[in-house]
Image (cartoon, rainbow, N blue to C red):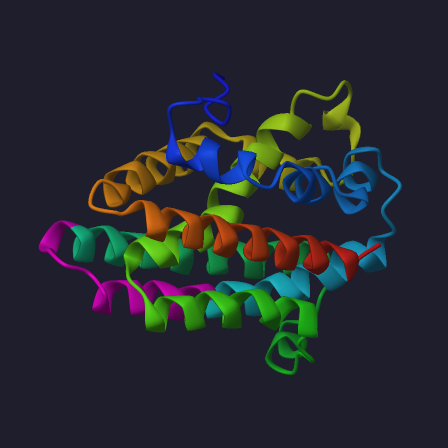
Amino acid sequence: MVNIYNNKRTFFYKLKSSCKKEWSEYTNHKFLSDLVSNKLPDKNFKNYLVQDYVFLQQFLKILALSVYKSNNFEEINRSVNFIKGIDHEIKLHINYCKKWKIPLKSLNNIVVEKANSAYTNYVLRMGKNGDNLDIFSCLSVCIIGYGEIGFNLSKIKNWKKSKYSSWIKMYSSKEYQQVAKDNIDYLDALLKNSTDKKLNMLKRNFKKSTVLERNFWECFV
């Protein structure tokens, strides 16, 4: 695998470089180091899976908004295909929950953590007031961030011995790395018609999104 996350020519690299401290706290969080080293208690990981199930549903709503905010068929088609991908991921997620003996009925009665809804609500708010560049620059923290996290964790010695290795495998997989790369490229495409004033706002929104995603990990350590 090639490290696509440190290509200095991409807009994504500029975004994460504008908040190095926050990005490091997010992508090197204790939740992740405990996950790869097998120190994360089962109940913490199960709580994460349950909360992530809700997160994915909110993610679909954000992508539906991105369809509405699209300026051409190419953008519409991209968001629709993304929705199909997330729908598939939710089905995989349900099977994952079964493996961890999480009752499916419980997935319909989830008490949502404030740190969970804070990020998706923020992205929805930015998207309603902005455009697809606003939406996907905030979402890149999650979409591309998980790709970078999976890539980095798969470089750690003995990661396959972790009982959570299937989670690492999912986000370090060739398929997910391609999703991350596509989104890095898409950000660059969306940026072409932007202004310097907008650029500063996008960096602020990215930083805020990174902090909110870091806070989400805090629920599970």
Main secondary structure of the magenta stretch: helix
Write the residue at 63% across / 72% down: 104
Write the residue at 63% across / 55% down: 213
Is residue 218 shown left or right of residue 138? Answer: right
Placement of 37 over or under 131, stated as above or below: above
Answer whether residue 72 is magenta in the image. yes
Write the residue at 31% across / 68% down: 64
Q: What are the residue bounds of the magenta stretch?
A: 59-74
Residue 188: where, in percent of width, then height? Answer: 30, 37
Write the residue at 63% across / 41% down: 23
Q: Quadrant of the C terminus?
A: bottom right
Is residue 1 shown left or right of residue 198? Answer: right
Residue 163: where, in percent of width, then height? Answer: 78, 39
Residue that sits furthest to the left in the current view: 73
Whether residue 207 appears in this view of the structure is yes
Answer whether residue 5 is magenta in the image. no
In this view, the residue in front, 22 or 179, is 22
In this view, the residue in front, 39 or 163, is 39
In this view, the residue in front, 70 or 170, is 70
Is residue 51 shown left or right of residue 176? Answer: right
